[in-house]
Image (cartoon, rainbow, N blue to C red):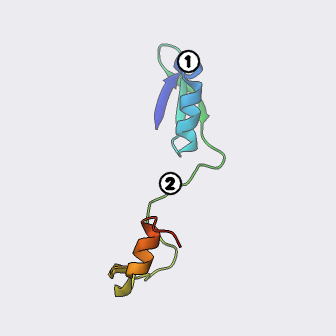
Amino acid sequence: MITATIFEAKTNFSNLVKQAQKGEMVLITSGRSKTPVARLEAINPVAKRRLGALETPGFVLSEQFFEPLPEEELRLWNGGGE
């Protein structure tokens, strides 16, 4: 949870909104006693995505995936024309 005074919230509002969109809750405080007065949180936080996270459980690459490409395909990938 992030805490910010009203002054800090006014000064850094854009950054606090971005943090809220990432799922953080921002507590806005007031006065010298820093009494909590408001809370900033996303309506629909953006889900954190992991690279390589697959929805299909048990997905496995076949051994063929790791085999070298045929010479003709390598030539095409390396700009050898069609």
Return the mark for residue 33. none
Pointer 2 local density, CA inside 10 Å: few below 14, some 14–19, many at least 20: few
Outermost residue, bottom direction? Answer: 63
* Outermost residue to the front: 81
Residue drawn at point x = 60 percent, y = 35 percent: 40
Q: Is residue 58 left or right of residue 14?
A: left
Q: Position of residue 17 (x, y in %)?
A: 59, 34
Callout 2–callout 1 Cβ contact below 8 Å = no
**Which residue occupies the foreground of this view, 11 or 73?**
73
Amino acid type, mark 2? Lys
Q: Which residue is the extreme one toward the right?
A: 43
Label ID, residue 11: 1
Helix, strand or loop at mark 2: loop
The image quadrant of residue 51 is bottom left
**43 vs 52: above or below:** above
Residue at position x 66%, y 46% from top? 43
> Is 29 or 77 nearer to us in this picture?
77
Q: Residue furthest top?
A: 32
**Residue 80 rendering spot, x and y as whole percentages:** 45, 68
Pointer 2 or 1: first along the chain: 1
Q: Nearer the viewer, residue 20 or 40?
A: 20
What is the x, y in percent for residue 23? 53, 46
Point 62% across, 43% down: residue: 42
Q: Horizontal and vertical percent for residue 33?
A: 47, 17
Figure quadrant of residue 15 = top right
Q: Nearer the viewer, residue 51 or 78?
A: 78
Regarding mark 1 in the picture, which secondary structure is present there?
A: helix
Q: Which mark is residue 48?
A: 2
**C-alpha separation, residue under disc 2 versus residue under disc 1:** 26 Å
**10 Å crowding of disc 1: few (<14), some (14-19), many (20+):** few
In the figure, 25 relative to 36: above or below? below
User: Residue 13 is drawn in which quadrant?
Assistant: top right
